[in-house]
């Protein structure tokens, strides 16, 4: 294998490892589809509420982050019907997915702050 191919493979491996490590270390996943800025906190679900990975993976969500947002039925209507987050966020087990919108929907500005991409003001 030539040096260029080896370098590309090594960089790709580091990139994938970096993404995975970031998701695990930080505990947050921010969905960007079908709307920008819907946050899921692993810390809240696992650490604070004592949930196990198997409660969501692989029945409600695939293990790979952000895979769900590629599905046509990843919508609020689907959540209201008990799919995805709505399987637990039904008003009985956890707050209803149709209430407390700002708990999950952080929007564009929240997304920018969470990812460090917010424009910084130079005015004082």
Image (cartoon, rainbow, N blue to C red):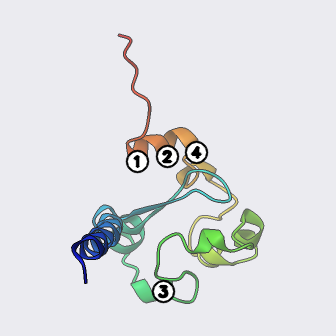
Residue 107 is tagged as 4
Closer mark to the observer between disc 1 and disc 3: 1
Contact check, label 4 and label 1, Cβ < 8 Å:
no
Q: Quadrant of the C terminus?
A: top left
Identified at 76% across, 75% down, the residue is: 81
Identified at 40% across, 48% down, the residue is: 115
Identified at 65% across, 65% down, the residue is: 96
Residue 55 is tagged as 3
* Residue linked to disc 2: 111
* Residue linked to disc 1: 115
- Quick check: can you spot residue 91? no
* Alpha carbons under labels 3 and 2: distance apart: 26 Å
Q: Is residue 43 left or right of residue 104?
A: left
Contact check, label 1 and label 2, Cβ < 8 Å:
yes
| 78 up-or-down from 122: above or below | below
Disc 4 or 1, which lies upstream in sequence?
4
């Amino acid at each position: 294998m030539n040096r260029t191919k080896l370098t590309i493979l090594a960089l790709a491996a580091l990139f994938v490892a970096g993404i995975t490590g970031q998701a695990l270390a930080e505990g947050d996943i921010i969905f960007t589809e079908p709307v920008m800025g819907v946050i899921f906190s692993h810390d809240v679900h696992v650490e604070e509420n004592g949930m196990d990975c198997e409660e969501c993976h692989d029945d409600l969500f695939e293990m790979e982050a952000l895979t769900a947002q590629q599905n046509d039925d990843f919508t609020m209507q689907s959540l209201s019907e008990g799919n995805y987050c709505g399987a637990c966020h039904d008003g009985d087990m956890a707050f209803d997915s149709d209430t407390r919108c700002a708990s999950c929907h952080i929007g564009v500005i929240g997304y920018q702050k969470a990812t460090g991409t917010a424009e910084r003001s130079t005015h004082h």
